[in-house]
Amino acid sequence: MNEDDYKTEKKKEAASFNPTGFDPHSLAELPAPMLQWIDQNGFDIVFVCDYEGIIHYTSSSITRLLGYLPEEVVGTSSLAYLDSCDVPVLRNRFESTTEWPQRFHLTILDNRGKHIWMEASISLTENQGVPYYVGVAKDVSDKKEIEEMMFRSEKMSVAGQLAAGIAHEIRNPLTSLKGFLQLIQAGISRKEEYYQIMVEEIEKIETITSELLFISKPVAENKEPETIHEMLQDVITLLYSQARLQNVQISFEKGENSKLLCDRSQIKQLFINLIKNALEEMPNGGKIDIRQRQEGNDCIVDVVDEGPGIPDEVLAKLKEPFFTTKKEGTGLGLMICTQILDKHNGALDILRNETKGSTFRASLPISL
Ligand code: ADP
Ligand code: MG
């Protein structure tokens, strides 16, 4: 028997293999005990809500994942189990999209009051003309822990790489402070004027060191209303010294000052990673444009560089962890950017500039 004949024979065998006495072509046709097993042991929670968010069905797996009994939650509002921060974002996305399913990262309250990180995929469907949301949600807490470890190591590596530029930036005001102190020691007049300059120099040092401390602090997820201009300005301050060392100019074009419900430290980390990548593409100077604007319900930030651009073979691998083309690279920067944006229900697009270089575009939903 040749190989093809063998395969045909096996297929026939499989088709006639029917020891259980049923012939299912879809999940719905499985016998009740099997459906029940899936209902109880699935890794996901399957749920159905009406248009107002009232829960009509949840699989029994909810008891294992969140501690509730299905009959406890049926009839209640799904919004009661969500973080209040996530509700407007969800509502906004549901109202503005026609593409289903939609994917979300959410924290869900379990029956002991603990917030569980879940990833949900939700679609709008209808049954006899009545619209319903059908979704599955899975626990991603373990994944979160690993992500946080990576976050921390990438943050420390960024802090380390920036240290040289920052030390340089701090040395200048220190030198002038020392000079003024020596003048005052020598009994010079016009002391008041010098004091003022000294305070300004100290403030410069303060801004830089506090930004550095900020990025090396451990991550704690904490979403608050923030404005985009201030966050971007802080990031530019932090990277300014590095840019100057490399003869790169950073320009900031501001649009409407969008309000975001976000974790400030993560959004800063996102832009540090993007601008740092742009800087690393231009070791011999150039210009980075940061262009921010509001478009519909999104705040868009473009980080535009004048580097050599991204070759096709690199583009495909860009968001993979540990992919780097740099000697000192970690290959985690862009992956972390994608994760931060995911967690804020935003997106990262990578575009090729018409002339030279690339544009990394972050879109984030504004808080209404
Ligand atoms: P790392 O910077 O440590 O290499 P990233 O995840 O930040 O890791 O970036 C991955 C790779 O993507 C880089 O090594 C580089 O090849 C490419 N890349 C990132 N940003 C740019 C950019 N602005 N222009 C060209 N290539 C880029
Ligand atoms: Mg990087």
Image (spheres, helix red, strand yellow):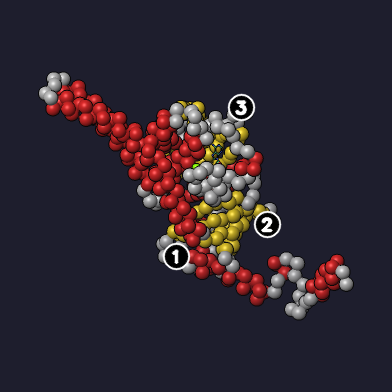
Q: Amino acid at mark 3?
A: Thr
Residue drawn at (15%, 26%) of the image: 184
Q: Position of residue 330 (x, y in %)?
A: 49, 47
Query: What distance separates the C-alpha of mark 1 from that of mark 3?
Result: 56 Å
Tell how many labels.
3
- Between label 1 and label 2, give the one nearer the viewer: 1
Residue drawn at (18%, 29%) of the image: 181
Residue drawn at (63%, 51%) of the image: 101
Q: Position of residue 216 (x, y in %)?
A: 37, 46
Q: Secondary structure at mark 1?
A: loop
Q: Secondary structure at mark 2?
A: strand
Q: Is residue 202 visible?
A: yes
- Between label 1 and label 3, give the one nearer the viewer: 3
Of 277 and 37, which appears nearest the observer? 277
In the rendered view, tell whether residue 108 sits above or below residue 337.
below
- Is residue 244 left or right of 96 when viewed as pictured? left
In the rendered view, tell whether residue 102 sits above or below residue 173.
below
| First of labels 1, 3 by sequence position | 1
Q: Is residue 68 visible?
A: no
Of 44 and 270, which appears nearest the observer? 270
Say which residue label 2 marks: 127
Question: Which residue lies most toward the left here?
Answer: 187
Q: Amino acid at mark 2?
A: Asn
In the rendered view, tell whether residue 197 sits above or below residue 27.
above
Residue drawn at (12%, 24%) of the image: 186
Say which residue label 3 marks: 355
| First of labels 1, 2 by sequence position | 1
Say which residue label 1 marks: 111
Q: Amino acid at mark 1?
A: Asn
